[in-house]
Image (cartoon, rainbow, N blue to C red):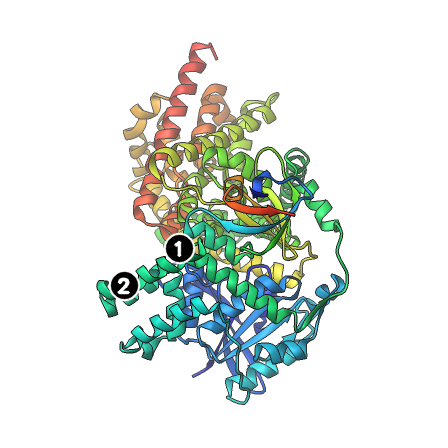
């Protein structure tokens, strides 16, 4: 059995950098069983021994409220790790030691502290005597600067020693006021008679019970019964009465006081900091006016970069797939098989896979913004606006991602810590026009509105974004109600990103896109090919696809469209760029398409394409991140919305004489 | 003088004395270091939207609603 090393720590402490440095490319990302929290694992090899390194979700505390916290806590609590490496940020010792104390309080005896960003701390005038700190805390400490690669070898050595039982520790644990300690002892005495003692650290259980931790209350209720539990809770209420404060606050503040006393023994502050450059920058970047202008500028440049570099690459890839299909075709004798492979699979999957450069570049750009520290500031600026629509500022990031591709955007809602916010953001996400829809919009705008091309495109985009906000507001009002999550976000120190971390992260993210294309879109492409080739080739009016289209024709007529639009939209469900390619197949040439529709019809088609059902991959992503119920809900509401808007535009447009 | 955090102006400093409100929000603040006894400085505060604060060398943006529940003794 490989020994397991768990990495724990606050967000933004450099955990990921350390994880990457320890495991290199031998890592993979999945989900924790049963929940959609990223599970990152990798292999560390040192002195001929292999270790499994698990990167726990970054958390501020182990009072389990979010799934992230629960995952991290359960992993540590169950003793699943042979060594726990607690990464702490030397520039924010107080807060980071809070988590360290919570970990030690669980009674763990296998903790190493990786004191990261030690160089940055020195720059801030924070002098840490590491040797002294080691004595005071009673655990091995490695001073590191993970970005520079400093301290890594020492960390590996200590992991190796501890995993093999050659490094012992005697951790300090927080002591509270006598009154609180008396309560802890009282509860411990009651728990002693039960089986709980075999599985858990009793002191930890007692402290968590004092904090009224839901999970622990349920656990103790099962073992003690309600009468004894009520008695204990009564005690707690009395103590709170005397302190005039809730117990979890009493414990937290006494824990901080304890940490403060410890810190005096190994930390010296050599300079008093005035307003730093970061403070000034923050005032500017989070300003309601300048901040918003900068935000638009930053994202404009980002999209410019992504499309300038990505679109040509997409073209090459698309050509490559076409060329591959053409090369392969003559080698296959069986006509049906050739059709399936060349026109179905290669053409279908290829057209989606060719979007990979765009998706990767978008993730790359966003990872850079994230690592620089800008994303948190963007969330602050957007909070003012989005909160009015029931969305938190943090959901701005997944919504921006959606302009590239809805699939990774839906997956990115995982970064939201509140379940309600997550669901809301996920459900309105597909309304944001992705790059596939950009191809449809730009084709129609170019072909039908030569002089007002940009205006038409912008109006469709703006309508989609406004509808997304409106739907969010409606959903938060009437469907997914519940308390608005409190907004608090750390503004991390501005940093120059590490290219290795950024590239690895973008690759991990965009890999899921390929996986989706490989499965769902493969099946979809085969279905399209079948529907359009049987019982006769499409273009003759007799294929299944065309018959289906004619079935929907009466409905399409409400918005001024015909059966051909129905077929195209149907195929657009696989991937939205199919809408245009299907038109191409039916009509044969661009001129024929232009001749067959009025500008108003083209506008309606562009709008409906943008708003109706998300592509199959997105529906699949929503299902994976929530459930079938919400995936179906999204499909239904989007079809209704698209129909409504389509019918409205057609009728108003005709009435106005267009 | 004890006031809610959202009443302070940029540059003001104070010590947290209590946090009102439900346990979920409270414990989130506590985990981030905004606990009774901590010194807070206001970096930026506008009429609407989050307030930027600094606690223990770390900067945070905190929503107005939350900030109204953090009681501060002004320094």
Residue reaching furthest to the bottom: A166
Give whichever of A235, A228 is nearer the camera. Answer: A235
Q: Residue at x 67, y 66 (%)?
A: A117
Q: Is residue A20 visible?
A: no
Q: Which residue is mark 2?
A: A231
Position of A411 compared to A445: left or right?
Answer: left
Q: Position of residue A156 (x, y in %)?
A: 60, 80
Q: For numbered disc 2, what is the local secondary structure?
A: helix
- Assess disc 2: are there few (<14), some (14-19) or many (≥20) residues with their C-alpha within 10 Å of its C-alpha: few
Q: Residue at x 29, y 38 (%)?
A: A544
Give whichever of B42, A586 is nearer the camera. Answer: B42
Mark number, residue A192: none
Q: Quadrant of residue A32?
A: bottom left
- Assess disc 1: are there few (<14), some (14-19) or many (≥20) residues with their C-alpha within 10 Å of its C-alpha: few
Q: Quadrant of residue A66?
A: bottom left
Q: Quadrant of residue A200?
A: bottom left
Q: Residue at x 69, y 44 (%)?
A: B11
Q: Quadrant of the N terminus of chain A?
A: bottom left
> Could you give the CA–CA distance between mark 1 and mark 2, rounded to whole angstroms?
16 Å
Q: Which residue is mark 1?
A: A241
Q: Residue under mark 2: which chain is it in? A: A
């Amino acid at each position: 059995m490989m020994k397991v090393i768990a990495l724990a720590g606050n967000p933004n402490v450099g955990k990921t950098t350390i994880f990457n440095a320890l495991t290199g490319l031998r890592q993979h990302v999945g989900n924790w069983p049963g929940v959609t929290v990223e599970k990152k694992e990798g292999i560390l090899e040192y002195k001929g021994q292999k270790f499994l390194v698990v990167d726990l979700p970054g958390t501020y505390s182990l009072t389990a409220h979010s799934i992230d916290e629960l995952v991290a806590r359960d992993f540590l609590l169950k003793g699943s790790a042979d060594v726990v490496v607690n990464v702490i940020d030397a520039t924010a010792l107080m807060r980071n030691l809070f988590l360290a104390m919570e970990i030690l309080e669980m009674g763990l005896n296998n903790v190493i502290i990786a004191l990261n960003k030690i160089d940055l701390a020195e720059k801030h005038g924070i002098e840490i005597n590491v040797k002294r700190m080691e004595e005071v805390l009673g655990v091995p400490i490695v001073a590191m600067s993970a970005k520079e690669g400093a301290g890594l070898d020492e960390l590996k050595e200590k992991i190796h020693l501890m995993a093999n039982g050659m490094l012992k520790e005697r951790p300090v644990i927080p002591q509270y006021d006598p009154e609180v300690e008396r309560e802890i002892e009282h509860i411990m005495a009651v728990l002693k008679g039960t089986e709980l003692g075999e599985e858990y650290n009793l002191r930890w259980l007692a402290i968590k019970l004092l904090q009224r931790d839901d999970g622990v209350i349920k656990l103790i209720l099962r073992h003690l019964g309600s009468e004894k539990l009520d008695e204990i809770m009564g005690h707690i209420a009395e103590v709170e009465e005397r302190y005039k404060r809730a117990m979890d606050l009493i414990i937290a503040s006494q824990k901080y006081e304890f940490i403060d006393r410890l810190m005096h023994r190994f930390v010296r502050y050599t300079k008093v900091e005035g307003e730093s450059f970061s403070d000034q920058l923050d005032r500017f970047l989070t300003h309601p006016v300048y901040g918003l202008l900068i935000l638009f500028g930053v994202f404009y440049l980002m999209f410019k970069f992504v499309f300038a570099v990505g679109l040509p690459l997409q073209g090459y890839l698309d050509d490559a797939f076409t060329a591959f299909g053409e090369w392969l075709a003559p080698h296959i004798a069986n006509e049906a098989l050739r059709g399936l492979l060349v026109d179905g699979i290669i053409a279908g999957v290829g057209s989606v896979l060719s979007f990979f450069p765009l998706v990767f570049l978008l993730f790359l750009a966003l990872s850079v913004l994230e690592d620089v520290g800008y994303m948190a500031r963007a969330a602050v600026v957007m909070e003012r606006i989005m909160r009015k629509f029931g969305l938190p500022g943090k959901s701005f990031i997944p919504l921006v991602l959606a302009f590239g591709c809805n699939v990774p955007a839906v997956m990115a809602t995982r970064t939201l810590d509140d379940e309600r916010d997550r669901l809301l953001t996920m459900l309105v996400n597909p309304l944001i026009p992705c790059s596939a829809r950009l191809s449809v919009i730009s084709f129609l705008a170019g072909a039908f509105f030569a002089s007002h091309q940009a205006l038409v495109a912008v109006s469709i985009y703006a309508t989609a974004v406004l509808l997304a906000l409106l739907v969010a507001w409606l959903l938060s009002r009437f469907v997914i109600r519940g308390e608005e999550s409190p907004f608090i976000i750390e503004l991390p120190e501005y940093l120059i990103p590490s290219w290795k971390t950024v590239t690895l992260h973008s690759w991990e993210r965009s890999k899921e896109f390929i996986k989706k294309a490989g499965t769902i879109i493969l099946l979809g492409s085969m279905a399209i090919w079948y529907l359009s080739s049987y019982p006769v080739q499409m273009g003759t009016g007799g294929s299944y696809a065309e018959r289906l289209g004619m079935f929907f024709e009466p409905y399409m007529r409400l918005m001024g469209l015909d059966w051909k639009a129905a077929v195209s939209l149907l195929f657009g469900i696989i991937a939205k760029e199919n809408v245009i390619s299907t038109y191409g197949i039916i009509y044969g040439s661009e001129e024929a398409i232009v001749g067959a529709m009025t500008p108003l019809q083209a506008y309606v088609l562009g709008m409906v394409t943008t708003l109706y059902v998300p592509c199959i991959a997105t529906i699949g992503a929503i299902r994976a991140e929530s459930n079938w119920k919400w995936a179906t809900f999204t499909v239904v509401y989007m079809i209704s919305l698209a129909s409504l808007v389509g019918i409205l535009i057609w009728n108003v447009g005709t009435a106005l004489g267009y | 003088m004890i006031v809610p955090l959202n009443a302070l102006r940029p540059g003001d400093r104070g010590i947290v004395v209590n946090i009102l409100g439900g346990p979920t929000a409270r414990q989130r603040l506590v985990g981030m270091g905004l606990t009774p006894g901590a010194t807070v400085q206001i970096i930026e505060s506008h009429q609407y939207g989050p307030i930027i604060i600094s606690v223990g060398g770390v900067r945070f943006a905190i929503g107005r609603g939350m900030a109204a529940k953090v009681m501060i003794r002004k320094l």
